[in-house]
Amino acid sequence: MPEPRLLTSRPPATEPTGGALAGPSPGPVGRARASLRALEALNRITTQDAGPSAADLAALRGWAGWGPMAPAFSRARNGAWREIGERLEWLLPPGQLREAEQATPNAFYTPPGLASGCWQILRGLGFDRGRVLEPGCGAGAFIAATPGDVQATWMGVERDPVTARIAQLLHPTAQIINQQLQSAALPAHSADAVIGNVPFGDVPVYDPTAPKDVAKSLHNYCIWRSVRTLRPGGVAVLITSRYTMDARDSAAPPRPRRPARQHRLDRDRRAP
């Protein structure tokens, strides 16, 4: 029985990590304003209880996540950041505002060009149809980058409720699961491919089913959990941090003893 194959890479050190920016990346204020327009569109859609218009969808594609919004939450904010922060306070209830601020350290999403590059790798490994999982999907950068000749049925997992709602509106045929990855019901051997930019951070994950060494870090856990969904012979193309790539111990999913019985590292690539 063929083993699932795992291919990992890491982005350049200057790239934010973690859904999609529409078009060329603007500056920090421009990204924050684009995200603010996406929130306003989402609020309008929710209030009117109607489907999104073409203009709404265009605005939603500008969602860059909470990460670029960080200066708007600062007590020392001024100028444009003060304006953006006050608008956020008007749009979001207090509880959601606190959750958004707490998400700013790692809620950065993948540029379209990087997602397209990962798809080129996946196509090169022979994948052209089947069920695909994007873990930590954000607004669905890898779903949006699906080549036109690929027949994919999508599952995406996103813990942030605002981002998950945006992803569902942008990709209505996809199954978007608004949960933490460790809580999501993802049956083993249910995916033909996995592709994505795994969320990462030096934080442990509670999952009693996971090996202890894997659960020590968010990004390694996400790789391990994603690979468990692959059917025999399935392929994963995942972006991870240098900490996974440089690891010499069993905490790194491509090399540990237990996960090694479930998948094979086909190759890894480092961005310059």
Image (cartoon, rainbow, N blue to C red):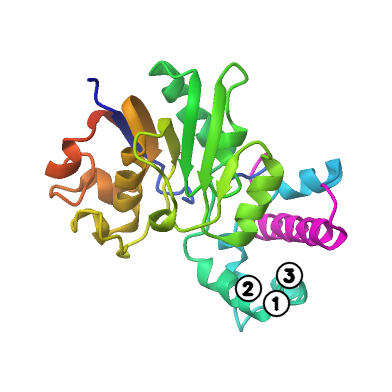
- In the rendered view, tell whether residue 155 sits above or below residue 231: below
Please tell me whether mark 1 sits on a helix, a strand or a loop: loop
With 58 as the anchor, is 126 left or right in this view?
Answer: left
Please tell me whether mark 3 sits on a helix, a strand or a loop: helix
Q: Main secondary structure of the magenta part?
A: helix
Q: Which disc number belongs to residue 84?
A: 3
Q: Given the image, on which type of amino acid does mark 2 rest? A: Gln
In reply to whether residue 39 is colored magenta, the answer given is yes
Q: Position of residue 34 (x, y in %)?
A: 73, 54
Please tell me whether mark 2 sits on a helix, a strand or a loop: helix
Give the magenta-colored segment's residue range: 23-51
Q: Residues within 10 Å of mark 1 (few under 14, many from 20)?
A: few
Image point (20%, 54%), residue name: 211
Q: Position of residue 241 (x, y in %)?
A: 34, 48
Q: Are marks 1 and 2 in contact (CB under 8 Å)?
A: yes
Q: Position of residue 11 (x, y in %)?
A: 41, 42
Q: How many marks?
A: 3
Nearer the observer, 233 or 34: 233
Work out which quarter of the rendered image holds the C terminus and state it.
top left
Q: Residues within 10 Å of mark 2 (few under 14, many from 20)?
A: some
Residue annotated with mark 2: 96
